[in-house]
Image (cartoon, grey):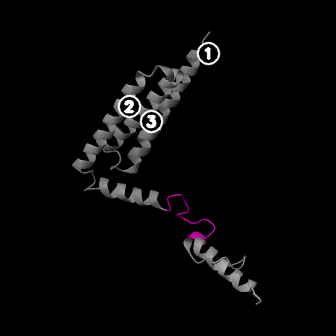
């Protein structure tokens, strides 16, 4: 009894398995894209495949209630601010952090600052012009502070 192996059928079955794994056709180098993911720079070509934009849409939906967030949303923001404060409090007593202590506390304080200004002072819900004005003033204040620190450090 002679066993005949048809290599073309075997190749086609492997190609079909590979295509089902990829989700698109692999025949031909110059093929027309079938799906948005086949395009050279797809919109949702991320590890989360568009989940970040979905979360952004949900965030906008939750925070936009007649121009302001709901009371539950403000309670969640207050809870997050409280958790960040507890983290700052705990970090202060970790002696092994050494020189990383101040930068970590500054970063956490900056995060709290942005949340308070953005939500409790309603900057997120106002005109974008106010956000740009506030951000430019903040950047100017940070630049002046850094310049003063450098000037005082090199003072003879």
Q: Residue at x 71, y 79 (%)?
A: 28
Disc 3, SS:
helix
Q: Residue at x 36, y 26 (%)?
A: 89
Instruction: Write down the quadrant of residue 61 in the picture.
Output: bottom left
Placement of the N terminus among the 4 image quadrants: bottom right
Counting other residues with Cα less than 10 Å from the Cα at mark 3, is it few (<14), some (14-19), or many (20 or more)?
few
Q: Does the magenta-highlighted stretch encompass residue 40? A: yes
Whether label 1 touches label 3, CB < 8 Å: no
Image quarter where the C terminus lies is: top right
Q: Residue at left 58%, top 18%?
A: 151
Is residue 121 at all visible to an observer of this figure?
no
Q: Secondary structure at mark 1?
A: loop
User: Left of 98 or right of it: where is 55?
Assistant: left
Image depth: mark 2 or mark 3 in front: 2
Q: How many marks?
A: 3
Find the distance from the CA under tag 2 to the CA under tag 3.
28 Å
Residue that protrudes farthest toward the front in the picture: 1
Q: Is residue 52 left or right of residue 118?
A: right
Q: Is residue 80 visible?
A: yes
Q: In the rendered image, which residue does mark 1 sit on?
A: 154
Q: Main secondary structure of the magenta part?
A: loop
**Quarter of the figure with residue 113:** top left
**Residue at numbered disc 3:** 137
Residue 87 badge: 2
User: Range of the magenta residues?
Assistant: 37-49
**Looking at the image, do the residues carrying marks 2 and 3 touch, with CB atoms under 8 Å apart?**
no
The location of residue 15, given as percent across then percent down, is 67, 78
Between marks 2 and 1, how big is the CA–CA gap? 34 Å
């Amino acid at each position: 009894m002679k066993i005949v192996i048809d290599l073309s059928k075997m190749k086609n079955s492997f190609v079909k398995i590979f295509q089902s794994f990829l989700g698109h056709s692999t025949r031909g180098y110059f093929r027309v894209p079938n799906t948005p993911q086949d395009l050279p720079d797809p919109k949702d070509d991320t590890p989360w495949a568009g989940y970040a934009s979905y979360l952004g849409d949900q965030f906008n939906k939750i925070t936009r209630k007649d121009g302001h967030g709901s009371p539950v949303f403000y309670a969640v923001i207050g809870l997050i601010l409280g958790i960040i404060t507890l983290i700052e409090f705990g970090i202060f007593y970790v002696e092994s952090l050494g020189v990383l202590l101040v930068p970590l506390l500054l970063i956490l304080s900056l995060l709290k600052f942005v949340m308070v200004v953005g939500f409790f002072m309603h900057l997120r819900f106002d005109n974008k012009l106010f956000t740009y004005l506030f951000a430019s003033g903040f950047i100017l204040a940070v630049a002046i502070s850094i310049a003063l620190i450098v000037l005082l450090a090199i003072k003879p």
